[in-house]
Image: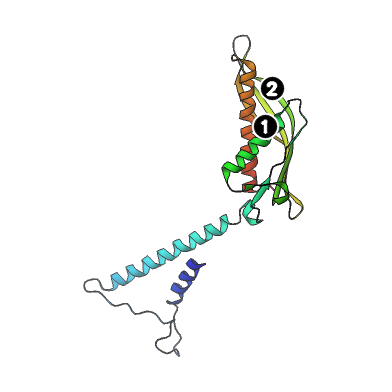
């Protein structure tokens, strides 16, 4: 607002006056004294510099206004709760692992504070639906890499307005693991990559407005 007022004040000083206005009115054109050796070129350069500065200030103000109406900012959402997700898959403990990844994602992003559900502006709810594994690359006889996909359902709910902001029935995150390594360890790393991908997608969606 200060920048806009400054620009409007500047523009106002160069508005033409009517023939009946008295000398000294603040809308009359300012008198610029010529400097020795510079003359009208110096005056013109001063005016152009001021116009450029005002244009830059206006652009900055418009940009600020745009970003202040981002997905979470426009609704005044400043905090989120992430209760333990449901698990409809056959993978034991994966719902806890994804819940932890989501919380870490929000904390790392910093746009929303993670709080208890009874104090949150919004609540993220969801469930792990299923896990799928399939060969990704093959050697001469067997698969060398496997792709493991985690499918989830997520709902972002405005706890104050009592309405769903966005909902995804089937989000997917995936990871790839090496079949030549010790399977349990390699598979766990692949699942971890899939959960990180899901957490990033969810956090990004809350910022840009998934609804």
Q: Which residue is mark 2?
A: 133
Where 31 falls versus 114 (above or below)?
below
Tell me how far mark 2 sits from mark 1, CA to CA.
Answer: 18 Å
Residue 73 shows in the view: yes
Q: Nearer the viewer, residue 162 or 147?
A: 162
Q: Position of residue 117 (x, y in %)?
A: 72, 47
**Location of residue 141 with respect to 197 vertically, above or below:** above
Which residue carries the number 1 mark?
97
View extreme (top): residue: 141
Which mark is in front, 2 or 1? 1
- Give the farthest residue toward the left: 37
Residue 77 at x, y percent in the picture: 66, 53
For the residue carrying disc 1, how many other residues have a C-alpha within 10 Å: few (<14), some (14-19), or many (20+)?
some
What percent of the width, then of the height, locates residue 91?
Answer: 73, 25
Instruction: Give me the residue at 46% from left, 70% from top.
Output: 6
* Disc number placed over residue 53 in the picture, else none: none
Q: Secondary structure at mark 1?
A: helix
Q: Position of residue 13 (x, y in %)?
A: 43, 77
SS of the residue under disc 2: strand
């Amino acid at each position: 607002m200060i920048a806009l007022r400054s620009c409007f004040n500047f523009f106002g000083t160069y508005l033409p006056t009517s023939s009946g206005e008295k000398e000294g009115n603040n809308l009359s054109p300012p008198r610029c004294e010529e400097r020795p050796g510079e003359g009208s070129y110096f005056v013109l350069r001063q005016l152009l510099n001021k116009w450029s500065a005002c244009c830059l200030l206006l652009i900055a103000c418009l940009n600020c206004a745009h970003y202040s109406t981002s997905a979470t900012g426009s609704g005044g959402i400043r905090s989120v709760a992430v209760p333990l997700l449901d698990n409809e898959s056959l993978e034991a403990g994966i719902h806890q692992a994804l819940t932890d990844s989501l919380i870490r994602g929000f904390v790392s992003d910093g746009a929303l504070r993670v709080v208890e559900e009874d104090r949150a502006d919004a609540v993220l709810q969801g469930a792990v639906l299923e896990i799928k594994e399939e060969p990704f690359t093959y050697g001469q006889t067997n698969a060398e890499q496997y792709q493991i996909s985690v499918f989830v359902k997520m709902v972002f709910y405005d706890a104050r307005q009592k309405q769903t902001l966005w909902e995804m029935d089937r989000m997917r995150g995936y990871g790839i693991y090496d079949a030549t390594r010790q399977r349990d360890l390699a598979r766990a790393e692949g699942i971890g990559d899939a959960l990180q991908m899901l957490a990033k997608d969810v956090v990004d969606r809350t910022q840009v407005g998934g609804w």
